[in-house]
Amino acid sequence: MTQPVLEAVNVVKELGKGAAKVVALKGVNLSLVKGELTLLMGPSGSGKTTLLSILGCILTPTSGTVRVEGEEVAGKSAEELAELRRRHIGFIFQSYNLFPTLSALENVRIALDVIGRKGYQAAQRAEECLRDVGLGNRLKNYPSNLSGGEQQRVAVARAIAASPSVVLADERTAARDSENGHAVMALLARIAKEQHRSGRRGAEAAGPRRT
Amino acid sequence: MVLTLAFRNLFHDRIRLAVTLVGILFSIVLVAIQLGMYLGSSRMITSMIERSNSDLWIMTYGAKSFEEGGILLTTRERHQALATPGVKAVIPLVVAFAEWRKPEGGSTRVVLVGTDAEDGALEPWSLVEGTWQDIKSPDAISADDTYFRELGINGIGDTAQIAMGRVKVKALTHRIRSFTQSPYVFTTLSRARSLLGAESDKATYYLVQLEPGANLETVRRELLNRLDGAEVLTKSEFEDRSLRQWLFRTGAGLALIGGALLGILVGTVIVAQTLYSSTKDHLNEFATLRALGSSSGYIYKVILAQAGLSAVIGYVLGILISLGILYISRNTPLPLVMTPGLAIALLGLTLFMSAVSAISAIIKVTRIDPATVFNR
């Protein structure tokens, strides 16, 4: 059986304290393997983003176990968690979170820079990723000069640049723009297949959606 | 990418960048002027001692500064000093404040320096008109061309009165400025004694030159044993004493240093404030970096690079303005001084000030929760 790259076992997450306490996740079990595209859909407030944050080693669960490439997350310091993210996880945020002062190419390069890949090779890799997502002709453009769909593809290129084990995409915007959403889905599916990388995609909608 | 991001963050908001640069620039200029004045003052105070060709200075006990030595030493001390092993020459110098009566009426105070240049201990430097031979002619003195207005003269050939006698300007020095604002006037040793009404064997200082190979401390100890009521100081000790007298006992130096500290404080606060608000504005980007897996150190580097870039740009502008002010001040009563050492120290100070300013921004970033990237 294939070893999961990301595994959640009986994950519970409580937010707030006392009377304001909310159980955002109750005993979630999930396993992602390489080359697979996993989609998670649910209504607003169902805990998709919280789960994504926990799987991405940004939040720690109240109880339960999360493993990244077999390595248990519990008890790790903030710096150690950052290192896990650097080594294994790529993110596509729902608002893309591109740096407005950097060009498309630089936005991708910075993801390589934080993992210590610099110079000409990093620039080449960033360019290659942008060409992969169809933005070979928009390398020098700043986010403000790119359409929403193009910004999203820059975010995808940034997520895959460091060849992570898993790409986590929090993807509310695409759900509101089905054409663009489908395009990104197709792109992620292709990347997962081509690069044998697993992916999880959360989409927020007004109500429960058919998957 | 650290530098690129820092540079773009800085230049993204031009108005805030301008405020930061004005803060640094203001600070640099203020510190440069204050320290330039301090250095300028120090040079003026110590120039005579510095220029002297001597190893030790003998003076009456308690002499406060070059200008305030009294005329109390006699030939007895000179002979005692000359008889000390290791001493090659003991050269007398007369220095005293004296009243200068202007040709057209009115008076001012000058510092009269009586020296025999042939003895090789002290002579007027930067003579632009006339020679030492001219100063040796009857009634002759040299005056400084930057003090014409204060002295009420126009140049060579003008006459005036110093204390008890008539004098004629026969030579001109250029930019030998005095911290006390009483111009230095050079003449021969005997004429100085005569003008001041001092006895012919009196002196303010004896400048001691040592035999080659003589040990300075040994000679100094021996001189102290032989001379009653006199002090023996090295050049640097006498410079320090003069500086203490004029800069610290009068409070002038403290005011200059206080001004410089104020400049540093104001600059630090302005830079800290703008850097903090810039960091706050870019907090989401720092949170994104953190979510992408960057270490805290990487983010600190971006903030410190922003601070460093501001510092370097602000420094270059500040130093250019300071040099302009220095140029304008060259003929004023207190010319400012900029040395390569001071310029380097100012760069170090600017970088340090900006690094300190970055602390508040770094503290803000330390508290970043990368989870906020999912809530935008």
Image: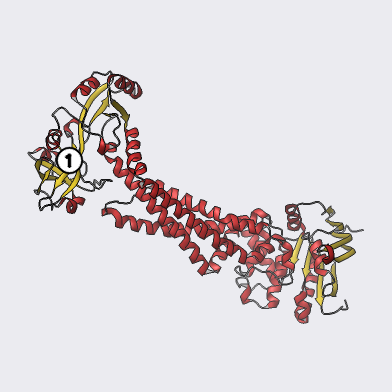
Mark 1: few/some/many CA within 10 Å (<14, 14-19, 20+): many
Q: Is residue A139 left or right of residue A94?
A: left
Residue lying furthest right: A1
Q: Quadrant of residue B227?
A: top left
Amino acid type at mark 1: Phe
Q: Is residue A96 above or below residue B72?
A: below
Q: State how the image is colored.
A: secondary structure
Can residue A35 be seen here? The reply is no
Q: Is residue B142 above or below residue A145?
A: above
Q: Nearer the viewer, residue B144 or B126?
A: B144
**Residue A137 image position (x, y, % from top left):** 63, 74
For the N terminus of chain B, give its image quadrant. bottom right
Looking at the image, how many numbered discs can be counted on the residues?
Answer: 1
For the C terminus of chain B, give its image quadrant. bottom right
Q: Is residue B271 left or right of residue B86?
A: right
**Residue B223 image position (x, y, % from top left):** 29, 21
- Residue in the image at 71% along x and 58% along y: B293
Query: Given the image, what chain letter belongs to the residue carrying mark 1?
Result: B
- Residue in the image at 61% along x and 59% along y: A120
Q: Quadrant of residue B282?
A: bottom right
Q: Nearer the viewer, residue B121 or B247?
A: B247
Q: Is residue B203 above or below residue A86?
A: above
**Residue A156 image position (x, y, % from top left):** 73, 69
Q: Nearer the viewer, residue B158 or A101?
A: B158
Instruction: Classify mark 1: helix, strand or loop.
Output: strand
Can residue A106 be seen here? The reply is yes
Q: Quadrant of residue A89?
A: bottom right
Q: Which residue is mark 1?
A: B186
- Residue in the image at 21% along x and 46% along y: B183
**Residue A164 image position (x, y, % from top left):** 76, 60
